[in-house]
């Protein structure tokens, strides 16, 4: 069907990673094993932090949030992919596709923001230990955690609302194994300049800002650690991060 002909697409077809049945068996086993390890490992981390009062510190607060986000992130992708491989049915309805895109983007951004918050926490505890309790109090760390969740959800919600507006024309084939912004934009018929502009500007800002924060703060941390003269002193500095 020509790309200019618009149609109301109700479902999409994933091409997936491969169409070879033998490779799909190996992919299913590997992704299932990785998913189970991911969920069980992160669940153990969260349970250990909640069950041990000595771990009720700011750093472990961020770590437990990171483990929760990581579990949610993989749960939004892997189970659906495993079902598609197992049933050989690689279609997904429009609404579930948008939902998967929402959670994929939201949890991915939350993960980046939490890593940036942890970088700030580590920087303060190593480079400015005397001001740590004032600068990184429980309330401020809680606000950082809440902000990470809220900003990522608003970011993803904006993209989902805009993605629900365009019509789709021609093929309904997604050259991917999940619903993401860019693969869906390639199937959109009308002018998607607003979506693309938002993805380039606001999307780049939300993605690059945490990355820059992480790089800059860990460069400062590395310089501070290397400035400690003895190996025992360096170990003590690292131990302050847990």
Image (cartoon, rainbow, N blue to C red):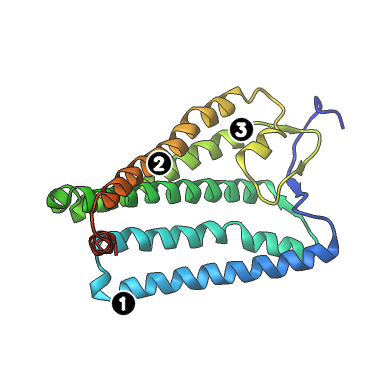
Q: Earlier in the sequence, mark 2 or mark 1?
A: 1
Direction from residue 73 to residue 136 in the image, left or right? left
| Dot 1: element | helix
| Dot 2: element | helix
Q: Which mark is nearer the camera, 2 or 1?
A: 2
Q: Quadrant of the C terminus?
A: bottom left
Spatial CA distance of label 3 from label 2 is: 29 Å
Q: Nearer the viewer, residue 119 or 192?
A: 119
Residue 36, position as x, y percentages in the image: 58, 71
The residue drawn where x is 22% and y is 61% is: 233
What residue does disc 2 label?
Answer: 210
Q: Quadrant of residue 211?
A: top left
Direction from residue 79 to residue 58 in the image, left or right? left
What residue does disc 3 label?
Answer: 165
Residue 162, position as x, y percentages in the image: 56, 33
| Dot 3: element | loop
Residue 170, position as x, y percentages in the image: 81, 33
Direction from residue 16 to residue 78 in the image, left or right? left
The residue drawn where x is 39% and y is 50% is: 115
Spatial CA distance of label 1 from label 3 is: 46 Å
């Amino acid at each position: 069907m020509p790309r200019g002909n618009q149609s109301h697409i109700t479902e999409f077809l994933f091409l997936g990673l491969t169409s070879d049945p033998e490779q799909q068996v190996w992919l299913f086993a590997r992704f299932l094993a990785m998913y189970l390890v991911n969920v069980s490992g992160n669940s153990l981390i969260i349970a250990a932090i909640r069950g041990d009062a000595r771990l009720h510190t700011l750093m472990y607060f961020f770590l437990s949030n990171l483990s929760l986000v990581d579990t949610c992130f993989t749960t939004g992708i892997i189970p659906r992919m495993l079902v598609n491989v197992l049933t050989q049915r690689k279609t997904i309805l429009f609404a579930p596709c948008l939902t998967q895109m929402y959670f994929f983007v939201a949890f991915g951004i939350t993960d980046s923001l939490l890593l940036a918050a942890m970088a700030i926490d580590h920087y303060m505890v190593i480079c400015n230990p005397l001001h740590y309790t004032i600068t990184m109090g429980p309330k401020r760390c809680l606000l950082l955690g809440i902000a990470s969740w809220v900003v990522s959800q608003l970011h993803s919600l904006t993209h989902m609302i805009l993605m629900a507006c365009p019509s789709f024309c021609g093929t309904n084939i997604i050259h991917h194994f999940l619903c993401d912004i860019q693969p869906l934009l390639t199937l959109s018929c009308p002018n998607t300049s607003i979506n693309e502009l938002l993805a380039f500007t606001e999307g780049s800002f939300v993605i690059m800002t945490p990355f820059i924060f992480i790089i800059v703060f860990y460069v400062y941390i590395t310089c501070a650690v290397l400035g400690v003269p003895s190996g025992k002193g360096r170990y003590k500095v690292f131990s302050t991060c847990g």
